Image (cartoon, helix red, strand yellow):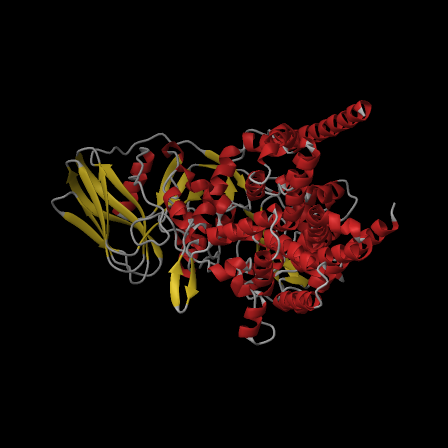
Amino acid sequence: MNRKILIELALVVILTIITPIIAIRDVAFHVGFIYQRDSIPPFYLNSWQTAESYLSFPAIMDNSLIPLLLLLYFNVISPMIFYWIQYLLFPFALAVPSMYWASRHFIKKIYNTKIKEDIGSNYYKLISVSLTTAFLYAITPTAFYFSHWSDYAGFYAFMPALIAGIDYSLDKRNPILLALFESLTTTDPRGFVFTFLITLTFLFLRWKEFKTLFLSIPYYLLINIRTFILLFFNFNQYNSIGQGISEIQLWLNYYTFPLLDSLRGLGLFRPLVPFYLGNAELEYILSFAIIEFSLLGYIFTKKNRFSNYFIALYLFLSFFISSYFVFFNKIITLNISYPVWGYLANTWAYKYLWLFLPTYISEMILCPLFLLFSLVAYNFVVTNNKIAPLLIVFVTISQLTFSSPAIITGNYFGWYDPVKIPEPLNQVAQYLLKHSQGNVLAFNISYPLPNEYSPPFSLIFNTTKIAKILNTLGVEYVVLPENNSVVKYFESQDNMSLVFNNTYYLIFRNQDFTYYLNSPIYLIFNYPEGLQEIIDMNLTPNVLPPYLLVNGSYVGGYIGNTTADELVFYAIKNNIAPLHFRLEHLDFPSNFTDTIDLNVYDIGITNTYVNAPIISVSSPSLLHKEIKEGYYYVVISFVSYPGSGDFVVGNGTYNLSISASGKVSLNFTYLGKMYFSKNFYLYYVGHNIAYFLNIWLIPITIKGSYVTKNITTIPYPYSPFGRVIPNQNEFNPTTIALITNTLSFFLVIFISLLNRIRAKRLT
């Protein structure tokens, strides 16, 4: 191999190793578990268990993570090493060779003649510019922010290689190679969509090569077949996950992206980019140096199709997600994409909009900018202009200054905090791994534990018979620090036995615990406080709040004492559903909408009343619905909140109303009887936020005698109610998907080898 090539490879390898050390040195010199962002990995799992926990959607889609998972699965590396390597690789280490090769590829392709004429100086200028670009790209604030998630970080790191790889594959007219490069950035559903879109945009540049792209599709499907198998078998589950993300995050991104932040690759995380030097104005100016250099350099240097593509992609993405910019103290509205999202939010596409959230599109912006920078910088240095090196040094220092706050901390402002797992806690985890079948309730412990269950409400009730309540929620063990104030509470409880004490932590076992709980479902109207009332029941029931609509044949009773409670119970027993309204998804709950405004109050309510069908409203509003004629009992449910207005039900002639103001609590209220000829009206009167749940119109002829069936549940720590119905179908498509993908991958390799052999014979 050429000596210069060896030197070049050595420089890239050295920079790849050094970059993560510079970025997060606290992690680099701590081979151990890391408190990353807001959690610690499950330290108690072995290699196989850790790998298995990742072999689900969407992590299983992440091609960049699969090699590490294979090493973990076959016990080549420990979980501790796995997490350590993962934090260093994504994106800090991987971004270096990716951007270096992409920068080198396009510079050589555009300026190849000049490099041949002066192989010495121009070759080293090529290396210097590409190395500088790669390092700056790997340590941007955007890179730091997306480093928390390996799939986003992987896409950010490999996007330069994707763009250069598409061009290289089209040069070679090799569809298999193109499919492999496209698989690099297939890191999650967004990565899949973004990869597809980037490939399409590049075809505007090389539209004559569409045949190669078309031929790459079957190879891409073979390389990534595990994803499509899992989507086929579990589409409904992933569909609901996607809709949940849209409901939570879509409006968080709405109208919140200033153009100047978008140009710098900053999204909603821009408040996390502090000014280390203490001079906000200076650092703000310096953060635009690379942008100004690249754009002005593009204007005043000779154009080529690649620089045209990079600047077009960069500006399109920046303007596409931006909502406004300030010009001489005037706010200029952009909102290019927001009307489209606003329209799609009220169509079937709503549940898929999470794929295009501006927060994640912002991870794509810097790649074309830095590739453009490398072309402009190289063009400057080969002109032998004496000012050019000084200008590039200034731009480099400016960009480093912009990235320096995160670098100087060594742990990204505490988001990467090395921790040592206390041995007493490790003993607790091992005990639970060995003995626990049910859920584990932990108090004031910041480390994860096996089967840990986090209820959405306090379980410290005024009772000495908490064991029965805990069994209803699937809780078998309770773990507390030895000096915790709750210790005496559990010591005083009936049927709670101390089974473990290592002087640091105590473990109490619930003697009432049963793995299988076979009983009817009881509805708790004054949820969650009403859980206390099951203590005096003759059985331990499965319980749910009544806002979760279940099959009435499995409902055996209710905990409540009002007319509204009784009427709703009978309605559910008769499988009478509450009225369904067609609602708009709005960025702010002015009218009735099932979109929740993301503030601390709403989050607190949604966390307490998990999965409640909350409809928000904050100004005078009206809903209308045509219904069947007749007399009905009218019951309304809502979450009361201080300062809320009134809900009013009307038939066009007269109205029934109720105030929604009060302390935060779940309310079911009987409004009275009402005759409806056809039209039903629901009004909100007020100017403060209110939280509506359901309206039941219950025929006055409703009956009260029914057959009741038992239902069997098992503990499940990830359910907000602690238990789930066991899956009768034990079929797990993951194993089949992985085996099929392994075979299909080797098939692609085999086809590639056959093509090479055939090509050699022809030559």
Front-most of 290 and 695? 290
Front-most of 649 and 685? 685
What x and y, as percent, mark residue 277? 60, 75
Residue 481 lies in what quarter of the image?
bottom right
The image quadrant where one finds the C terminus is top right
Judged left or right of residue 346, residue 679 is: left
Front-most of 350 and 427? 350
What residue is at 33 percent from the left and 45 percent from the top?
A: 584
What residue is at 18 percent from the left and 49 percent from the top?
A: 656
Question: Does residue 484 show up?
Answer: yes
What x and y, as percent, mark residue 172? 71, 34
What x and y, as percent, mark residue 704? 28, 34
Which residue is the extreme one toward the bottom?
A: 278
Residue 168 lies in what quarter of the image?
top right
Considering only vertical position in the picture, is 494 above or below 723? below
Judged left or right of residue 666, residue 472 is: right
